[in-house]
Amino acid sequence: MATDLLLISDTHVPGRARRLPEEVLRAADAADLVIHAGDWVTASVLDELQQHAPVRGVWGNNDGPDLRRRLPEVARADIDGVRLAVVHETGAARGREARMDAAFPDTDVLVFGHSHIPWDTVTPGGMRLLNPGSPTDRRRQPHRTMMTVRVDGGALHELRLIAL
């Protein structure tokens, strides 16, 4: 049975946006599970997303005690045979793949955030690293972004980076 995921991070509400973009909420309605890689800033974002789909997320460096009480620093799940982990920060881009192989040895896919820069690579150990960027703050990127992906049969299918 396939599972459709929405991957987002660094929503920074209300600092970077007053609310989540409608495109994010529509994608959450279509998803079986929302993965959020931290920097929500306000717990109301978590509450709102939970009204659209189940949510698996972590706290980021800009999240206060209210979110840190509700969310872990690292989240893990087995989704249709894919061992997924979520974390906010992975450090500098240089050497990321090797560091993440060492830090997450039993992981097939690691979703992370922090940089607001979309990322899709495979480590030497075969782990997929995904950063969906930010749907509210493009920073130095041409667009605000999010990702969708279908998990089925122990593999990722139809991964899309969506510009908002």
Image (spheres, rainbow, N blue to C red):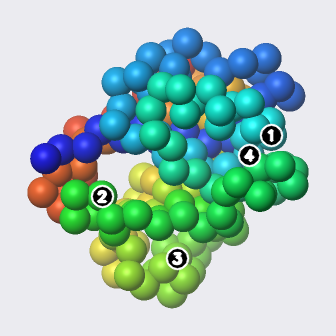
**Residue 1 place in picture, x, y as percent:** 13, 47
Marks 2 and 3, how far apart at CA = 20 Å
Q: Residue at x 12, y 57 (%)?
A: 153
Task: Name which quarter of the figure residue 19 lies in.
Answer: top right
Asked if the residue under mark 3 is in contact with the one under mark 1, i.e. CB atoms within 8 Å, the reply is: no
User: What residue is disc 1 on?
Assistant: 41
Q: Nearer the viewer, residue 93 or 103?
A: 103
**Residue 104 place in picture, x, y as percent:** 48, 79
Say what amino acid the circle numbered 4 marks.
Asp
Q: Which mark is residue 83?
A: none
User: What residue is disc 3 on?
Assistant: 100
Q: Nearer the viewer, residue 40 or 131?
A: 40
Marks 2 and 4, how far apart at CA = 23 Å
* Residue 130, placed above or below residue 146: below
Which callout, 2 or 1, points at the residue further toward the start of the chain? 1
Asked if the residue under mark 4 is in contact with the one under mark 3, i.e. CB atoms within 8 Å, the reply is: no
Asked if the residue under mark 4 is in contact with the one under mark 1, i.e. CB atoms within 8 Å, the reply is: yes
| Residue 16 appears in view | no
Q: Which is in the foreground here, disc 1 or disc 3?
A: 1
| Residue 97 appears in view | yes
Marks 2 and 1, how far apart at CA = 27 Å
Say what amino acid the circle numbered 3 marks.
Met
Q: Which mark is residue 39?
A: 4
Marks 1 and 3, how far apart at CA = 25 Å
User: What residue is disc 2 on?
Assistant: 79
